[in-house]
Amino acid sequence: MRFTLQSTIVYLIWIFLLGEGLYSLWQRQWNEAFVAGFTLSLTFLPFVFKDRLGVRLPMTFGALIVVFLFATLFLGEVGDFYERYWWWDVVLHSGSAIGFGLIGYVLVFMLFEGDRFAAPPLALAFLAFSIAVSIGAIWEIFEFSMDSLFGMNMQKSGLVDTMWDLIVNTIGASIGALAGYLYQKGKHFLGLSKMIEQFVSANAKFFRKNK
């Protein structure tokens, strides 16, 4: 991992979570130690995914995933950012949904080997949207499980919080899918096309027909 701004942010988050976990254990703050350790372990998943499947994950993608996990699990729960800042939940869910929409698009586009003519733009956008919404729904199940099994409070106001999260996820997924659709049409949208181009360029062997 080369030292770039993104990689530096990832390293700092790893160091912080490790230090916070060890300090919490020393202070016998078991809940904080668990959240720090659990968050740290999840932040390695994007890079494990890259090594196992042979997919090169651009550092921007990996860094955003790490930042999201850190922001939602550690800052949101231990730092109580969800209660301090009303917009925290909205920003995280909308941002992550956009990201999942982009990931969904490039994964489906990969099946066509990057052939812009063979891959129907609307169909790919719809599949990307569906993947992003599905991941958002799975995340809500994860929040419910964490609250039920470990006594956390990720759902906050319960049903109301869950429904608003799903609404925000749907909006974000729409934006991510739209970015993929416009990318295939050769148009740029909010700088998101650049992220798609980075992924396609980093994994050129999977997009042999990309023109």
Image (cartoon, helix red, strand yellow):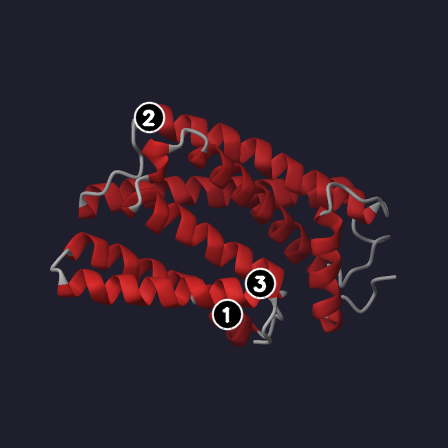
3 or 2: mark nearer the eye: 3
Amino acid type shown at disc 2 = Leu
Q: In the rendered image, which quarter is residue 40 located in?
A: bottom left
Q: Please state, as top left, top right, bottom left or bottom right, where the N terminus lies in the image.
A: bottom right
Task: Tell me residue 108's x, y (percent).
Answer: 67, 54
Q: Using the image, determine if residue 64 lies above or below residue 82.
A: below
- Residue in the picture at 67% in, 55% down: 106
Is disc 1 placed on a helix, strand or loop? helix
Task: Tell me residue 198's x, y (percent).
Answer: 72, 61
Q: Using the image, determine if residue 145 lies above or below residue 107.
A: above
Residue that numbered label 2 is attached to:
159
2 or 1: mark nearer the eye: 1
Label 2: how many Cα within 10 Å (few below 14, some 14–19, many 20+): few
For residue 47, which numbered disc appears in the image? 1
Is disc 2 placed on a helix, strand or loop? helix
Task: Tell me residue 147's x, y (percent).
Answer: 24, 41
Q: In the rendered image, which quarter is residue 36 located in?
A: bottom left
Labelled pair 3, 1 in contact (Cβ < 8 Å): no
Labelled pair 3, 2 in contact (Cβ < 8 Å): no
Residue that numbered label 3 is attached to:
6
Q: CA distance from mark 2 to mark 1?
A: 34 Å
Label 3: how many Cα within 10 Å (few below 14, some 14–19, many 20+): some
- Residue in the picture at 44% in, 36% down: 88
Label 1: how many Cα within 10 Å (few below 14, some 14–19, many 20+): some
Q: Using the image, determine if residue 158 lies above or below residue 144.
A: above
Q: CA distance from mark 3 to mark 2?
A: 35 Å
Amino acid type shown at disc 3 = Gln
Q: CA distance from mark 3 to mark 1?
A: 14 Å
Q: Please state, as top left, top right, bottom left or bottom right, where the C terminus lies in the image.
A: bottom right
Amino acid type shown at disc 1 = Phe
Is disc 3 placed on a helix, strand or loop? helix
